[in-house]
Amino acid sequence: MTTHISSIFQWLAPSLTKHFLQVDEEMINPLEEIRLRLNRPVELVAYGKRSFLLSPITHKPVIFTEYELEHTLNMITGSSIYALEEELKRGYITLPGGHRVGMCGKVLLSAGEIKTQKQIASLNFRIAREFPGVAKGLLPYLTEHKRPLSTIIVSPPCCGKTTLLRDLIRSFSDGSEWSEPSSVGLVDERSEVAAVFRGTPQLDVGARTDVLDSCPKAAGMMMLVRSMAPQVIATDEIGSLEDIRALEDSLNMGIELLCTAHGHSVRDLQLRPAFRQILSNKMFKRIVILSRTRGVGTVEKILDGYSLQEIKPRREGLVC
Amino acid sequence: MLTLVGAGLVITATSLAGRLVAKSVAQRPRDLEVLQAQLLQLETEISYGLTPLKDAFVNVGSDRSHPVNRAFCLIGQLMRDNAFISAEAAIIEAATVLYDNTALQQADIDILVGLARVIGKSDLVEQKRHFCLAQTRLEGALKEATATAQRLTKPISYLGFLGGLALVLITI
């Protein structure tokens, strides 16, 4: 796991940072989220559990003030809210280090579509962490003749599928004892996989990975095929029929696919029309099912995409 | 002889003082024009380039030939060097430099300080409105400064000389 939680504090108002610096490192290091709501207590999320930040002196919850909000907004926007209209429209900003700040305020509409947000009153700092090497144990099953196989990772939310996807991208891109280095095209619609900040991926996605940031998946895949000629196309959370069509087109051009999807099992996927098509057309050669039965990133099964038979016995331990 | 030298010195001193004040009065419209041009350039950087504020100020002030340009560059540098300084604080700090090095009056600089309170804090449409308002106020100040300069530059210059002469005559 690699992250420097203290790098988050530089974006907060000094009066707030002061409180964080007085809290035990054991409590600070595992933080996943810092939620700041105007005139309400500062909330911390770690290991999925929620608590309020307490003042070490009064032992009462620390309240997020208007001054702190203004200062924090100035810091994360570089005093240039006008330059971040796209980000405000999407609802989050990516910071150096790959951390993301979700924002909530008053939404302005134009012709029925979200134009921007004003009067931001809630911020959610989501701390980015990398787990290099989590995919290592899976590589022998997801490669053949030193080439990556088209793979889909299926799991319910918060089971580590994006983390696993990122590490697989990195492994295929850089190469490993199981696969030759490949050029990977990543369509990162929600900037979650590579966390691009001003053109540079903040999370390691490999030396041979080209990232198409904030681009709709279907359009992005076609764009990558035409412009970058990748050997592997990776994308997170596929689901629409449009995505499936783009995946099919990519496959027809001899490109291997690396995708994730929400779901608990193959049976779960078979109930959804788009995925029924994926499974019946045998678009993926491997299906990895994740869960958190023994912690985040438990590999439940690795299935062969053609026969839907398990190709590896149930694996003990965690992947990520 | 000493009286004559003294009288000459007094007249020279008051004449120079008169000319300095007249020069300042004549310079103010020119400084206001530079300030207007700089704000227009800053607005372009913001509206069309979507340049972050600190970089926009440095870009606009990169031609450091005029004190107003240098003040804009200083604002950008202050924001680049100190992540904790707000645009408002940086502009207020540079306003002192403007006041000391240009013929701009406090009322002129207050237009910039007024803009500082809102710059970078809203979307493009609102930013454009704030710039438009600042430009309108500067236009008003420029008209007033130009009229003042046309009306007062020569009289102030003469007043220095004549004041000195009157002082000499009264004293002798």
Image: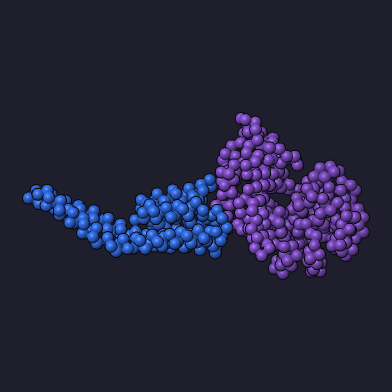
Chain colours: A purple, B blue
Q: Residue furthest left?
A: B1
- Residue at the location (88% across, 52% down)? A265
The N terminus of chain A sits in image quarter = top right
Closer to the camera in the image, B114 or A140: B114
Closer to the camera in the image, B18 or A195: B18
Closer to the camera in the image, B152 or A12: B152
Q: State how many labels appear.
A: 0
Q: Position of residue A99 (x, y in %)?
A: 66, 49
Q: Is residue A237 left or right of residue A89?
A: right
Q: Position of residue A276 (x, y in %)?
A: 88, 61
Q: Is residue A215 left or right of residue A81?
A: right
- Decide: is B167 above or below A250: above
Q: Position of residue A240 (x, y in %)?
A: 80, 62
Closer to the camera in the image, A132 or A3: A3
- Residue at the location (9% across, 51% down)? B4
Q: Is residue A63 visible?
A: yes
- Decide: is B119 above or below A21: below
- Residue at the location (82% across, 60% down)? A150
Q: Is residue B12 left or right of residue B148?
A: left
Q: Is residue B63 visible?
A: no
- Which quarter of the picture shows residue A108? bottom right
- Decide: is A134 above or below A276: above
- Residue at the location (82% across, 45% down)? A292
Q: Position of residue A12 (x, y in %)?
A: 60, 44
